[in-house]
Image (tube, rainbow, N blue to C red):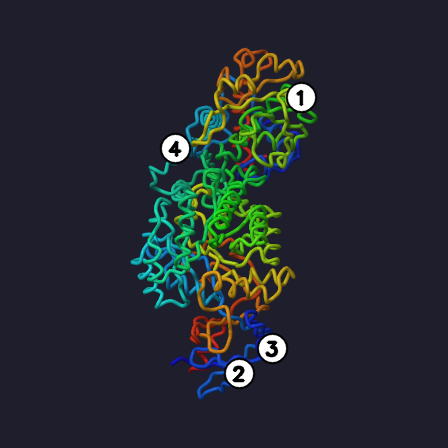
Amino acid sequence: MSQSWLLKNGRIIDPRNGVDRQGDLLVVNGAVAGPGEAATDGVREIDVQGCWIVPGLIDMHVHLREPGEEYKEDIVSGTRAAAAGGFTAVACMPNTRPVNDGMAVTILILQRARDGFARVYPVGAISKSSRGESLAEFADMKAAGVVALSDDGRPVRDSQLMRRALEYAGDYDLRVISHSEEKALGRHGVMNEGAVSTRLGLMGIPTAAESIMVYRDIALAEYTGRPVHIAHVSTIMSLDLIRAAKARGVRVTAETAPHYFTLTDEAVAGYNTNAKMNPPLRSEPDRLAVCEALADGTLDAVATDHAPHSTLEKEVEFDLAANGIIGLETSVPLTLALVRQGLIDEKRFVELLSVNPAGILGVAGGSLAAGVPADLTIIDPALEFDYTQDTVVSRSRNSPFLGWRLQGRAVLTMVDGRVMYDLHQRCEQHSS
Amino acid sequence: MNSGKTMTTGCHFSHKHILGIEHLSAEHIDHILQTAESFKEISGRSIKKVPTLRGRTIVNLFFEPSTRTRLSFEIAAKRMSADTFNISASTSSATKGETLIDTARNISAMHPDIIIIRHSCSGTPEMLTRYVRASVINAGDGTHEHPSQGLLDMMTVREHKGRLDGLKVTIIGDILHSRVAHSDIIGFTRMGSRVFVYGPATLIPVGLEKLGAVVCGSLEEAVRDADVVMTLRIQKERQSDPLLPTFREYAQNYGVTREVMALARNDALVMHPGPINRGVELMPDVADSSQSVILDQATNGVAVRMALLYLVMGNT
């Protein structure tokens, strides 16, 4: 039986239940207590004055690298980083070695996750080995515990396969998460195509490489009537397509990552391999459009695309460096920056990072209603900190935000009422 | 010191590395060109050697095949009495062994004074500066820059025209893959020339005007009244990217012929960084005409590289 907690003097922001109030939240036996429920003996009190109490944050797009590339990250280290970043759950992409395209790998991931610091929701592959040739066994994987399907990183090229995936996945209530990219257009590209790539002499990936496939995926979702989720949206044109599709009732949802609303392709200057990812950092107009789309509902979620790589993949020539950056520990402060800038409000912040990811994946969470498991995050929105090599919790350190002074972070993360991260170590002091 | 020509500028040259023209101010470009002009005479002597860099160690680290640039740097170094060493390395993924950084650190541990690097990946010289103590000179990186070529082009034009300011410099061909074009566009623009480029749309990179170039809509617009017409080497395809149907069609529509040159000023210079595809981007009679300064480019390359070696060693 887990510990009971009384979280005192916080600002409870729970948009799914229409709550935004100052007050206390009681956690009894790992669940959020109901209104009449009394504190039992042995309840520990924590004063969270000045902090927000929100439903546990869910990062619906991460790479945990296990099995196969544990030198970059594994499920324990990755979920430790997640908890430190305020996430109580993560959905991990299937591009492990071997690819999570069947029950065996799914079971292994879930088994390893028992020692983790956050809930792990495996995403299964759309195609066998993510080769884009034939469908993986969706039913089997669903039975084993996958919550969605994606060939992230190796986008489905064959439109017929994508259509069949949407149809068949619908039979098992699995959302298809599309990495929408026409690879031929950016075949030699290593960054966004534009004035900056020309200046740096780096081959470009045009914005059309993304929007062409976003349109294809929308067209297939519209035609089949099945839902599709577009991963890491980065361009104006993609957002316009999604906005228009939503307006005519197509079942499309979409996410972006903090780097797309924080940085532009100028961050590549100096050939910084920690600014290399796919899709690439885009231009300032694209960045502004992403911010706008987060506010107006075109984008449903913020997901980090946490992609750990070691120095072996990153301390090399820019052309040869691997794509991707870590993101779990910087998502909260970077998204809070949008709140401070007045682009989104606190309620929207919680929707983007908790309510909507839970809804899209069809998993529990995103709510602090009485009786739900106490997955919650306590955020100090004012707390400033230096994000440096030495403070990174993830096993890898490939972040373009190293050296940044950030504001706002999770100070306490609970899963099922159990403390997974406790910045100020107040919980330990209580128990000793 | 018999290299000791009097420098006419009071410029304080503070660059330890030469990574690209983009990092050089007009004043510094001018200073390099003046230094090169003063060194040029050494190559005309019967004994082509000055002791200026005696005892200095220079490593030519070439990850890409090169004939003229490497030879030019080596001749420049030897005429300055430096000790030079050539390393040809492969970057193909098939021969992945030691990382570039390990190679660089090992070379650095042997205390060279200057590392001259050519690499197929843009930005590699800049990356190298983070791992070595030596001065780094970029001898061409990917499609980024080829600063010594840009400088020798400016030197050659200035030698013939007496100035760079106000000239119309036209560059025709594969701008997309040309580090020479990038260095020339930045350099000539910075020195007051107007740079016009022309080529098939497949070979014109996005946002080129941000570097200062005017992208022309026709060959005629590009060449009319030009003071300099520079053509670039054409490749039909690169890495499975279909850029052009045929050389024949390119030559007919973009090749610089006598008729095309007639649009330019009568005293216009014909330039090419080499190697030339004769009959494709440049017709042989134009390449060999009295307007051609292509061989002057090669001669001046040695002088420019002598100047760069001299200046990065802290001499002004």
Residue B263, relative to residue A255: is it above or below?
A: above
Q: Mark 2, residues whose alpha carbon is within 10 Å: few (<14), some, or many (≥20)?
A: few
Q: What type is the residue that disc 2 sits on?
A: Pro
Q: Secondary structure at mark 3?
A: strand
Q: Is residue B56 visible?
A: no
- Residue behind mark 2: A35
At label 1, which amino acid type do we have? Gly
Q: How many marks?
A: 4
* Helix, strand or loop at mark 4: strand
Crowding at label 1, few (<14), some or many (≥20) Cα neighbours within 10 Å?
few
Q: Are marks 4 and 2 on the same chain?
A: no
Distance in Å between CA atoms under marks 4 and 2: 76 Å
Q: What residue is shown with label 1?
A: B162
Q: Of the residues tagged 3 and 4, which is closer to the observer?
A: 3
To which chain does the residue with label 1 belong? B
Name the residue rendered at 55%, 77% in the picture: A48
Location of residue B15 by image quarter: top right
Residue pointed to by mark 4: B87
The chain containing the residue under callout 3 comes to A
Q: Residue at x 62, y 35 (%)?
A: B211
Q: Secondary structure at mark 2?
A: loop
Q: Which residue is mark 3?
A: A22
